[in-house]
Amino acid sequence: MHTDVIPAAAPLIGDEEVAAVERVLRSGMLAQGPEVAAFEDEFAAQFVEGRPTVAVNSGTSGQLLGLLAAGVGQGDEVIVPSFTFAAVANSVVLAGATPVFVDIEPTHFTLDPERVRDAVTARTRGIMPVHLYGHPFLVDGIEEVAGEHGLDIYEDAAQAHGAAWQGRPVGTIGVFGMFSLYPTKNMTAIEGGMVSCADERVARRVRLLRNQGMETPYANEVVGYNNRMSEVHAAVGRVQLRRVAAWTRQRQENAAFLDAGLAGIDGLTVPAVAAGAVHVYHQYTVRIAGGERDRVREALRDEHGVGSGVYYPIPNHRLPALAPFAPAGDLPETERAAQEVLSLPVHPSLSADHLERIVTGVAAVMAAGG
């Protein structure tokens, strides 16, 4: 067993974040104050071309409130991928609607526009694709289907801060875009989420829903939730916001190194980047063919000290909580991806030695075979 394991993910928290937390704690203003407001404005300016943006207490809260603000509810269907985290379909169910699982395309692991077209019914209200692993979904194809049928697009940009499609930043494409600020994401606020909104009407509705249905104290306009972001979390997020661009460049450089070192290895496929897409490499996800994925993962950890992650080994349509919404048929590309994907370390904390060890280790393990 290798004792020095390179972690699959490594949140970066430094003295600036600690100082920001202390500053806010000593201020006595802990909820819905100037830090949250400033974070919303700064995030919007940096990532979503100044769109109205609302801070909430988690990415999942952001998805749910975004759907509700967009008018999704009882009797509606929302098309979603099964190959992603369960929060996507969970949020649809919590909004009172029905998730409809559709297969992915095999290259970028995102919703297949042709399969989406086949799944549209009279009840379909919208499509919620995921910008998976930091690569944008196939925007042109999804927009074509949405336009043909008059459907909304709701973006899950949880893993894609700074990604873009043909010059369009993710989070500026749909009725809303949700960004997660969980510790393992490309930037964090310890916990939290951001909802970028197509217009002020949607943004105001999200603000109402996050704060017990009110903007003015005690003047509750709708039945709402307590999904507010704290001042402490916003202060951490503001510090991270100043650093994330450099971290993203480092992720992209690390990915380029891995591409060069791993390309051409039999049985392994490195991540593809679509023409005109900006990939921010939340994960560096390869395919391992031939049923070898789990063996490769264990050997990398035990023999070479290389950690890795498997996202998502059980497709949503086979989870006990979501199986009642599963399609009559199977989702072959989703099932294949669940058996073959492996995410290697790509985070900014990697050293040159780490990157060399990852390449050497993968090459050796793949050459050894099963």
Image (cartoon, grey):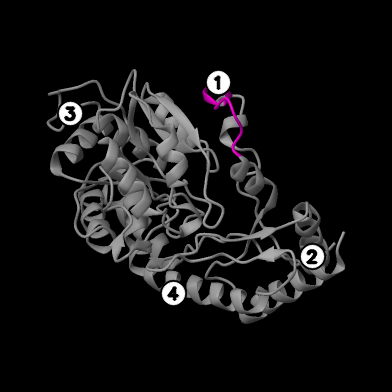
Q: Between residues 156 and 8, which one lies in front from this camera angle?
A: 156
Q: Quadrant of residue 330?
A: top right
Q: Earlier in the sequence, mark 3 or mark 1?
A: 3
What residue type is disc 4 on?
A: Arg
Residue 288 x %, y %? 71, 58
For discs 3 and 1, the disc positioned in front in the rendered view: 1
Which numbered marker is on residue 119?
none
Q: Are marks 3 and 1 in contact (CB under 8 Å)?
A: no
**Alpha carbon of mark 4 to alpha carbon of mark 1: how far?**
42 Å
Q: Earlier in the sequence, mark 2 or mark 3?
A: 2
Residue 194 x %, y %? 32, 47
What range is drawn magenta here?
A: 323-331
**Alpha carbon of mark 4 to alpha carbon of mark 3: how far?**
40 Å
Residue matched to label 1: 324
Residue matched to label 3: 214
Q: Between residues 220 and 34, which one lies in front from this camera angle?
A: 220
What residue type is disc 1 on?
A: Pro
For discs 2 and 1, the disc positioned in front in the rendered view: 1
Query: Which residue does the image show at 75% across and 54% down from the upper left?
Result: 293
**How busy is the neighbourhood of tag 2: few (under 14 within 10 Å), some, or many (20 plus)?**
few
Direction from residue 125 to residue 197 in the image, left or right: left
Q: Earlier in the sequence, mark 4 or mark 1?
A: 4
Which numbered marker is on residue 249?
4
**Alpha carbon of mark 3 to alpha carbon of mark 1: how far?**
35 Å
